[in-house]
Image (cartoon, rainbow, N blue to C red):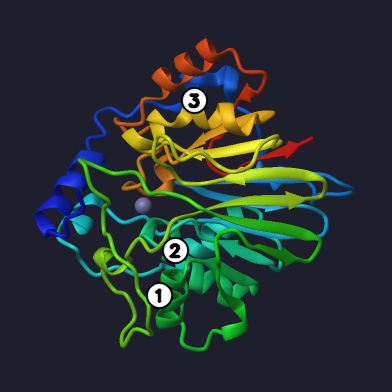
């Protein structure tokens, strides 16, 4: 049941924020892959590099194409989210972390799984700096345009699930997805279907829109990415090299094993597990509701052929 009451939003974020003594990645050292982003040369040949940007953010690049998924450098404290306080992308943090992540000079496409602030808020200023198409739901396009009215309409792609978009030599297939319910409903629900009179300025302005998943076919590799999902809603693709699966809360966690079963990935990277209310420079801390040890156990019991992996902030891994 979807309700829009502010009290419920508070409840959601209080639940999300029960970070306790959020554990670090070091207790799963055997699964960690990657090296500091700045230590790697740019990709050559058919190499594909994946850099983790925190939350559900990834830089995926080949020699020819650079794609960014859900970048979020301007963290917002829990207190500010609870009071729905004013928030906007921080130019200083964007500039600091794009450097740490060794961003290329230009980006070809920004893929937005849904339009909540932790997936879209930093995208319009990043697009202004690095160029590229913003591939999002129509809600994401209207929000982006409200932030940056100068953005070219040809750079805003209101993606249609089922369709594929060509970005250089990279093909991006868009699929419909689901947002996890939290305490029984979708946080910050709603669609935006017309231009907005004002730029979004508070967490609740970033309405979810229609959630999307993406299959990125880049330099001979197939990478599936989403930011969560509901049990029973399985991706319509199989046989991928890497599956990046959002497991922030209960629904995404409950569908994890069945989604791995459907996708048959060579590598599985559970995503959106960190406490995204604290600044990135505090380092990766699991959110107390991330339940990674349970996911890992269920994965091991499933006896899958693929390899479970984890990444720390601003580490880059070469997908071979
Ligand atoms: Zn969300």
The yes-or-no answer for disc 2 within 8 Å of ligand 1 is no
Location of residue 25 with respect to 300 vertically, above or below: below
Q: Kindly indicate the quadrant of the structure image that contains residue 265.
A: top right
User: Mark 2 vs mark 1: which is more N-terminal?
Assistant: 2
- Mark 2–mark 1 Cα distance, whole angstroms, equals 9 Å
Q: Specify the label residue 120 is tagged with.
A: 2
Question: Residue 221 in the image: x percent, y percent?
Answer: 77, 43
**Marks 2 & 3, CB-CB < 8 Å contact:** no
Quadrant housing residue 152: bottom right
* Ligand 1 neighbours mark 1 (CB distance < 8 Å): no
Is residue 47 positioned above or below 320 on the image?
A: below
Mark 2 element type = helix
Q: Residues within 10 Å of mark 1 (few under 14, many from 20)?
A: many
Within 10 Å of disc 2 (Cα), the crowding (few <14, some 14-19, many 20+) is many
Residue 40 in view of the camera: no
Q: Which residue is mark 1?
A: 143
Q: Identify the residue at image location x=43%, y=31%.
A: 255
State whether label 3 is within 8 Å of ligand 1. Answer: no
Q: Could you say where residue 150 lies in the image, as x and y percent from the top left?
A: 51, 89
Between the residue at mark 1 and the residue at mark 3, the CA separation in whole angstroms equals 34 Å
Element at label 3: helix
Q: CA distance from mark 2 to mark 3?
A: 27 Å
Q: Which residue is mark 3?
A: 257
Give the mark nearest the N terminus, 2 or 3: 2
Q: Foreground residue, 208 or 50?
A: 208
Instruction: Identify the mark nearer the N-term, 1 or 3.
Output: 1
């Amino acid at each position: 049941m979807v309700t829009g009451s502010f009290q419920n939003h508070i409840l959601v974020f209080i639940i999300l924020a029960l970070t306790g003594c959020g554990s670090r990645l070091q207790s799963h050292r055997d699964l960690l892959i990657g090296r500091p982003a700045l230590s790697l040369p740019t990709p050559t040949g058919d190499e594909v590099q994946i850099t983790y940007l925190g939350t559900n953010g990834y830089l995926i690049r080949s020699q020819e194409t650079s794609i960014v998924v859900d970048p979020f450098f301007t963290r917002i404290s829990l207190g500010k989210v609870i009071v729905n306080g004013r928030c906007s992308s921080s130019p200083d943090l964007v500039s600091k972390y794009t450097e740490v992540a060794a961003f290329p000079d230009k980006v070809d496409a920004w893929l937005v799984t849904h339009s909540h602030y932790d997936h879209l808020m930093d995208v319009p200023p990043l697009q202004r700096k690095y160029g590229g198409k913003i591939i999002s739901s129509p809600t994401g396009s209207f929000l982006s345009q409200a932030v940056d009215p100068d953005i070219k309409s040809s750079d805003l792609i209101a993606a249609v699930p089922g369709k594929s978009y060509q970005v250089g030599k990279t093909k991006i297939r868009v699929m419909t997805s689901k947002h996890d319910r939290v305490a029984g409903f979708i946080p910050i629900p709603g669609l935006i279907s017309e231009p907005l009179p004002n730029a979004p300025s508070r967490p609740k302005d970033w309405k979810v829109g229609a959630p999307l998943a993406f299959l990125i076919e880049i330099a001979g590799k197939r990478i599936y990415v989403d930011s969560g999902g509901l049990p029973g809603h399985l991706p319509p693709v199989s046989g991928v090299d890497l599956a990046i699966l959002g497991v922030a809360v209960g629904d995404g966690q409950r569908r994890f094993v069945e989604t791995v079963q459907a996708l048959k990935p060579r590598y599985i990277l559970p995503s959106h597990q960190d406490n995204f209310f604290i600044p990135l420079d505090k380092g990766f801390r699991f959110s107390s509701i991330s339940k990674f040890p349970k996911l890992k156990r269920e994965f091991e019991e499933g006896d899958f052929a693929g390899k479970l992996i984890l990444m720390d902030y601003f580490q880059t891994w070469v997908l071979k």
